[in-house]
Image: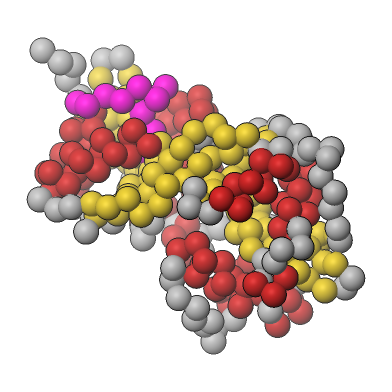
């Protein structure tokens, strides 16, 4: 007889944080997204958009040995999972799926380490009588030191109010390239001003002209994420993305973080090559799976 599994649902992010933080920290870089989201919710400083934990799904599945599975979903985004110590427990997955059905949460998809993502998707689709498709194959990289061989141009600076003349187009261009959302600049500037006000969005400036951007994503205990890397089509092929990411990575490490972490789309060999030249090393692969 297998171990008895308990499904635990949390409505208080601080309680959830206290229960799961140390477990997620066992693979801090791999858990960039769930850990980063958990910290955002715990601090409570930023509740823009999906960041209000009042709307989150937070759960664990445990047995007599402790927590075997941690699940966080920040609607409308996908479910993120972590199997403790990366040991997949089938009974824990079945228990989670049962708990999801009981609580009425709808799961648009799952994004996590390859094996765990596929196993959850198969079980969940079978339970719901639906199908699933792999939307994106990703690789998670970490960096300890920027390669000394990297030659950079320009300088990075924080975005500012005057950058609203181009920033909305870059934000939408990034979303279109990465997520296929279509290029649709919103007439309401507030959602773009958010990127400026948070003080985490950087642009690379060459000869007085902004040419590329990158963002500090999630900040954790020893790890900091890099994301939203974008260069407009008319500036590509000149090494600007390399310079931007290298400069931002150096800045992050200078601030005391031990590692920089980023996700790449494996369908884009150019970006994967760029990051490895900078000094990023792959640590694991991740799948984004959507239910259809």
- Judging depth in this view, the residue of 246 and 217 nearest the camera is 246
Q: Is residue 183 visible?
A: yes
Position of residue 82 in the picture relative to residue 123 (left or right)? right
Name the residue at 43% across, 31% down: 20
- Residue at the bottom extreme, as displayed: 187
The C terminus - image quarter: bottom left
- Residue at the right extreme, as displayed: 207
Q: Quadrant of residue 220?
A: top right
Q: Position of residue 265 (x, y in %)?
A: 50, 51
Position of residue 194 in the picture relative to residue 65 (left or right)? right
Q: Position of residue 122 (x, y in %)?
A: 20, 41
Name the residue at 88% across, 73% down: 208
Q: Position of residue 141 (x, y in %)?
A: 58, 38
In the depicted structure, whether residue 119 falls above or below residue 84: below
Q: Position of residue 142 (x, y in %)?
A: 62, 36
In the depicted structure, whether residue 155 falls above or below residue 275: below
In the depicted structure, whether residue 86 falls above or below residue 270: above
Name the residue at 41% across, 30% down: 19
What's drawn in magenta, residue-wise? 81-91
Q: Is residue 97 magenta?
A: no
Q: Is residue 218 visible?
A: no
Q: How is the structure coloured here?
A: secondary structure
Position of residue 69 in the picture relative to residue 265 (left or right)? left
Name the residue at 53% across, 40% down: 140
Position of residue 7 in the picture relative to residue 28 (left or right)? left
């Amino acid at each position: 007889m297998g171990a008895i599994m308990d499904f635990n649902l949390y409505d208080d992010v601080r309680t959830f944080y206290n229960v799961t933080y140390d477990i997620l920290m066992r693979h801090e870089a791999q858990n960039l997204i769930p850990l980063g989201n958990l910290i955002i919710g715990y601090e409570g400083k930023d509740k823009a958009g999906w960041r209000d934990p009042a709307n989150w799904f937070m759960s664990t599945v445990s047995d007599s040995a402790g927590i075997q599975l941690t699940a966080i979903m920040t609607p409308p985004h996908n479910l993120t999972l972590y199997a403790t110590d990366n040991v997949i427990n089938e009974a824990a997955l079945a228990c989670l799926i049962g708990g999801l059905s009981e609580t009425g949460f709808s799961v648009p998809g799952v994004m996590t380490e390859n094996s765990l993502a596929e196993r959850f998707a198969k079980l969940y689709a079978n339970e719901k009588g639906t199908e699933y498709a792999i939307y994106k194959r990703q690789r998670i990289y970490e960096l300890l030191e920027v390669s000394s061989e990297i030659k950079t141009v320009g300088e990075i600076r924080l975005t500012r109010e005057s950058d609203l003349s181009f920033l909305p187009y870059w934000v939408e261009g990034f979303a279109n390239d990465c997520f296929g959302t279509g290029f649709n600049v919103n007439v309401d500037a507030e959602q773009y001003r958010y990127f400026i006000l948070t003080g985490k969005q950087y642009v690379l400036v060459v000869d007085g002209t902004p040419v590329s951007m990158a963002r500090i994503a999630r900040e954790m205990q020893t790890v900091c994420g890099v994301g939203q890397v974008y260069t407009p089509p008319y500036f590509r092929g000149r090494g600007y993305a390399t310079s931007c990411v290298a400069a931002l990575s150096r800045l992050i490490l200078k601030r005391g973080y031990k590692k920089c972490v980023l996700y790449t789309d494996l369908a884009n060999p150019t970006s994967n090559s760029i990051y490895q030249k900078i000094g990023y090393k792959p640590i694991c692969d991740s799948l984004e799976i959507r239910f259809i």
